[in-house]
Structure formats: structure tokens, C-alpha cells
Amino acid sequence: MASESSRSTSTRSSRRVRSRRRPRSLRTVKTRTQRSSPHGFFEKLPAEVFDFILDHLSAVDASVFSMASKTISGCIMRHVSASAWRNQMILQWFHCTSPEAEGSALDHFRRLGLLCKRCTLLLPTKDRLRFSYSMFSQVPCLAMDRCSAFPFCRGLVYYGVFLNTLIAGWDELECHRVFDFLCENTDLQRTIEAAVTCRPGACHRLELAVRLFCRGVLLNQWQRGRDSFFWLTCILRPWPIVSQARLLFILFGPLQSDGEIGWQRVRDHVVGQGGLWDLAKAIVLLHDRKETKGWRPDTVLSIMDEMMITPLPWHSENMARLLILCGKSICYNILASKAINGRLSEISRLLIFLILVSEKDGYCMKWAVKMTQQVCQVFSVASEKWSFIQNMENMFSEVTMEHYELVMAGNHNGEMDSLQHLCCLLNAKAQRSHKALQSSVTEVAQLL
């Protein structure tokens, strides 16, 4: 009897132990099941509740959540494709015009670019581009010249920030695919063709559309010169040199007071440093990348030479100021090329205005004198050098008389401007003569 009672006691105690352990095993099985599901704890949620949760996530949080699994990523892609989400997250932000909202809008589209980058991480490049562009399919700003706020729309800049974040770190082949995709879906190439084949200034709205799209989406968002060079050459390379010259001016040339491209301004008026600075930086960027295949520094010089006579020759002071802003190497190469081709009158006039701009803008006169001496060394025969010097002196007299006649006749800018230019010219001539004489004395002293 004692043995039976002890047996029944042990049986009851073992049942108690098993009954206590059973809930633990059930919890373990449930957790493993949940871990094996792509949705995890969200597997039993209705789609509406899951979308409600996604609506309350920031773009950065949603981008991190999208990397949890392929299924979660697909759900987020479906969520951001809904028109309600696009209206709230894209369309409402696209025309922020106040300066206070500008910074917030840029950060917002940078975060959207990160979200798109992460949730499409497993897709091929073409599918990633197609999905990212579909997010902006209802935005008219990406279509050339169709935005109601054109040309003051900032939407292209916002899309450029988005695209910059999306493709950051992509290799050159993938970036070529990005450019081809944009050309195919935005009619970029056809718009450029129309802008560069019509008479300069005649299609001013198309010219502005090309400028705003290329700079806002492709050029202004990159910090490294290598990236800017890549996108600029993608834009320029398909066209002949004449069209490249016009396109470069459309992209970076100065604007007129009415907002149009300044074709007439560079021809008839003096443009300050600020108006030519972007153009000079673009020329230097193209010229200094000597290691790139299919793009030579000589090509840049030809483009620059063509640009300064399109549609008519620029004002000589604008030519000289652009050469100074481009730096010593480009300036010398342009002048030396003209010297080799025997264009003495043109070189002499440019050098006179180089000296005048140096005086007006506060550059060291020694630089202009040294440039004149280097150009003189291009001529190998003494008679050619003497002819060059005579052309320089005659051109100084001619330009001085031009300014004197403007002072006497008066012009639309006022007599004081013309008088000031004349005084600067005479002072520049004196400074140039002084520096040249000083340089000659130094050379003689070294020989002695």
C-alpha cells in the first residue's frame, strides 16, 4: 500500500511539472513561427491597419523598416505608390516658395530619396529608376516648360536633391543609365535640340527650361568636381562644337534683367564678374579634366572661341574678363592660338582690355604685363614681334579714342561712366608701361 501511494504521489507530481512546463513550450513554438514569417508580428494585421502604421512613420524610419525583409519592403513600396501618400509627401511640398520653408523642403526630399534608395535596394537599376520616377508622375514640373510657376519653380531643385540621394554611390555605368532614362522620360534631348538650333534668344522659354532642368536636376547638387564633370559632359557630348558652345552659354551664361538668357547683354553691355563667374567655373572644370577619354582641353578652347562670337562677337571687355576669370593657362592658350593664326588685331584688342579689366577689377598689373610678354614670345621672328608691339600701341590709341568719343557724345549709361572708363584706361596704360619698364630693367640687371 505504501508503494502504491508513493507511486500515485510521484505520478501527480510529474503531471504538475509537465503542466507547468507546457506554457513555456507553447510560447517558444509561437515565437519561432513568428520569426519565420516575412511580416513578423505584423502578419495577422489587416492591410488597412498596416498602412495606418506606415502613415505614422517618418521617411527615415520607414526606410530603416524597409530593410527588415523583402516582403516588408514590397509593402512599403505599395504604400508610397498610393496617390494619397504622394499628394501628402510630394505634391504639397513641390512649390514651397518662402525662404523659411526652403531648407525644410530640401531636407524632406533628401529623406524621401533615402527611403526610395533603401526600399528598392533589391531591384535592378531600371526598375529602381522606373519606380522612383513614378512617385513624381503627377508632378508637371518635371515635364519641360509645363509648370504653372515656371520659371520660378523650385521643384526641379527638389527632384535633383531626391535623385542625388537615390543614386549616391552608383558607378559610372549606372549613372549613364540614369541619364538615358531621364532623356527618355523628360524629352530632354529634343528640348535641347530645339533650343540650340533656333536663333539665339528666339526660343527663350525653351532655353530657360533646359537651363533650369539641367542645373536643378543634374549639375548643382554635386559637391565633387568629378561628379559635376561627368554630368556636364553627358549633356554636352552628343552635340557638335557649335551646339556645345551655345548649350554651355545657355546653361551658365549671364541672364538679362527680364530673366532671359543674356545673348544681347554680353554683346552690347559690360558684364561684371558675378555674371560671368558660373560660366568661367564650368570652362575651367571641363578644361582641367585632362585624363578623361574622348574629352580634350583643345575641345574646350574651341568651344570657348565659338561661344564668344555667338550670335555676334562679344563686347571686348566681357571677353577679357572671362579670360581672366578662367585663369592663366586658358587665357594664354586662347591668345597663343590667335597669335599662331596671325590674328594680330584681335590679340592686341584683347590684351588692351585685359589690362583695362585688371585696372578696373583690382588685379595685379604685373599679371597682364607678363601675359603680354608671353604672347610676344610666340612670334619667333623679330619682325613679327615688332609688328605685334606696333599693333598693341595703335590699338591703345584706338581704344582710348573710342572712350573719348563716348565721353564727348554721352551715352545711355551716363557721361560719368564713360569718363571713368577713360580714366581707368589711361591709368592702365601708365601702369602697364611702368611694369613693362620695371621688368625690362630687372632683366638687364640680371644679365649684368
Image (cartoon, rainbow, N blue to C red):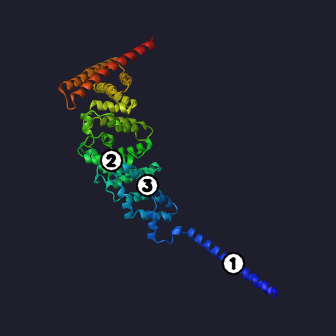
Count neighbours of disc 2 (C-alpha within 10 A) and say few if under 14, some if 14 to 19, many if 20 or more.
many
Q: Please, what secondary structure does the residue beneath circle 1 have? A: helix
Q: Quadrant of residue 268?
A: top left
Q: What amino acid is at disc 3?
A: Gly
> Given the image, on which type of amino acid does mark 1 rest?
Arg
x and y, in percent, of residue 200 in the image = 25, 42
Q: Quadrant of residue 374?
A: top left
Q: Secondary structure at mark 3?
A: helix
Relative side of 94 to 28, left or right: left
Residue, disc 3: 113
Of the two numbered discs 2 and 1 on the same chain, state the one appearing first in sequence: 1
Per the image, the residue denoted by label 2 is: 212
Q: Position of residue 100 (x, y in %)?
A: 37, 49
Picture coordinates of residue 353, whole percent (x, y): 30, 27
Vertical arrangement, residue 397 with respect to residue 214, above or below: above
Task: Identify the residue at horizontal 45%, vertical 58% (top origin).
Answer: 59
Q: Residue furthest right?
A: 2
300 vs 448, nearest the viewer: 448
Residue 113 location (% of width, % of height):
43, 54
What crowding class fits label 1: few (fewer than 14 Cα within 10 Å), some (14-19), or many (20 or more)?
A: few
Which kind of residue does numbered mark 2 sit on? Answer: Leu
Helix, strand or loop under label 2: helix
Q: Quadrant of the C terminus?
A: top left
Residue bearing mark 1: 18
Q: Earlier in the sequence, mark 3 or mark 1?
A: 1
